[in-house]
Image: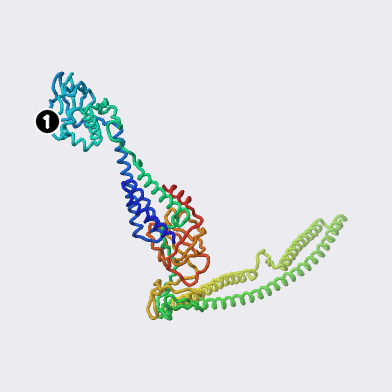
Amino acid sequence: MSSGEIFGYIASALVFATFYMKTMAPLRMVAIASNIAFITYAAIDGLAPIFILHVALLPLNVVRLLQIRDFEQQVEQAARESFSIQAIVPLMRRRAMRANETLFAINDPANELYYVVDGVLFLPELQHEIGPGNFIGEFALFSESGKRTATAIARTDCTLMALSRRAVFAALLQHPRLGIHLLKLVTVRLLHNAGRDLHVPVTAGGPSVSMNEVAMPTKGLFATKGRRNAVRLAVAAFLAVMIGMTLYDPLYVVLFRDAAVTTWLNVATAPIDGTVEGFDVKPGQRITGSGEVGRIVNYSVDRSGVIRAEGAAKRAEARLAELVAYDDRVSALTTEWQQRRSRYADGFRTDLDLRVQELEHHVALLQERVAIADVTARRKHTLRLAGNSSQADEDAAMSAQRELQASLTDTTKELERVRERRSLAQTGVFLQADGKEPEWSWRSLDEIRLEAAKTSRSLREAEEEVKTTKRIMADEQKNLAAASNAVFKLPDGMTIWSMSATSGISVNRGERLFTWIDCSKVLVDVPVSETLGVLVNEGERAEVTFEGEQKPRAAEVLLSRGSSSRLTRAELVSVSGARKTLAQVIVALREPVAGCPIGRRAFVTFPDIGLLQVVRAYLAVL
């Protein structure tokens, strides 16, 4: 016997018990217990009509039971408490009487009820006095004859409040406690007239009449033995439901049995515009081998991009070839000019060598002449001292000697400068006599080098341009190939779920072609309450029982979603039929399942979530 059947029998027994009840309060309590049992039974077995009916009846029975309890409490309170005259004062009129004045006589028509505010009234026939805080004249209002049964005379000055016959009945409808109070008062008067005066004054707003002396006792809700038995039966049924819920977790964990076996839905769309070819697969077919499903061919694809890219690549290659040839010419010119410069340098150094030799020879001659001039000057000086020569001859000889010495000094300095220039020329620095470099040593070569640098930079730019244009051409060719032909392949073992296209039709880019699933990844879409959805965490254990099976399968929680973010058929192959206000838990089976059980109903439990956790979560929400 399944758990659903057990609660079905319990619910049926409670319904039978309602026909045994004789009073409404126990009947309502047993009906509430039967509603709970029916709700549990319908939730387990997925009986939506029964579930909806008893979910609606449960609050109705609770409300009716509370109304019965409230009414009985009001009756008990009214029986215990006295009536306050303040409630009907707005309906009454004031009347003043002098001492010995007659209020009414015996057999007079009874049209009003009176309330004594102050003073004393005397009833001669009964030999009874009525003091302040008491009603008088009520007996005749409710008698069949409608006439006064005694005479009322004021012994002192009195103040009365009068209420007409019509106003009395209106007040009884608005203030039930007034009716209870007048019933007590009439009972006291009847007993008094029969000679059984209880000596208990009945006053409005004063002490109430003893319940044991005047009125029949109002018993409590659970006074009789039958009612006590009904309460015990209802409590026992409620405890049975709670024990069942405790022992069988799914009763409070999953409220709907329509959890659906599902998996991820993969949608294949057309990547290009074109004509479908080779789509020979059928829904439910399993893909094996190469995995090719079909292709799309576009015979009218635009080739202008490839043509432009090829033209740009050719132009870049032509420019590169021109720059390479120019660079070769610049390199040859540079080599030629370097050779010419080398010859200029050799000639420059040779000239300097000759100049050095010339100056060295000149210096040697000057040195000899200076030596001769020096000897001549000393001789002239000696002759002058001996008187054989004049002073003028000596001065001329000395002047010639100094001139030769100055010429020797200048020539020696020039020789040093030429030697320095020759030393610099050996290192590649060429200086003319005026200290400047000759043009052949720098001008033409620098211009050639500058042109070579410009050519080299242009050459690099041309090479980059060729690479870029070739890359663009390759991309355009690749795009052309992709836009001309698209082949669809699926992994081995995948299953076609549905087909939206067939061979020979034209499709647009992004249009849906077919859907496919992986039957090796079995999921279960489980509807749960929002509170339970919060308790269920990713990776938590779960047990799945397929419809028609008895042994549960091990699973784990993959993800949980609130009611506002549920996964639909756009992501899942099949979804549960639960209403959209429920949260959603996706459970993944840990082991493969034979066949492809997509769409089957399943029953899911979460062993790690107990009753106390659910109760605490609900209390936290409340």
Drawn side of residue 166 relative to residue 395, left or right = left
Dot 1: element: loop
Drawn side of residue 332 relative to residue 264, left or right = right
x and y percentages locating residue 274 in the rendered image: 40, 77
Give the residue type at disc 1.
Pro
**In this orientation, which residue lies closer to the viewer: 310 or 563?**
563
**In this orientation, which residue lies closer to the viewer: 320 or 528?**
528
x and y percentages locating residue 254 in the rendered image: 43, 58
Using the image, determine if residue 225 lies above or below residue 424. above
Query: Residue at horizontal 80%, vertical 58%?
Result: 398
The residue that label 1 is drawn on is: 109
**Could you tell me if residue 235 is visible in this image?**
yes
Query: Residue at horizontal 56%, vertical 70%?
Result: 457
**In this orientation, which residue lies closer to the viewer: 549 or 298?**
549
**Could you tell me if residue 563 is visible in this image?**
no
Using the image, determine if residue 145 lies above or below residue 255. above
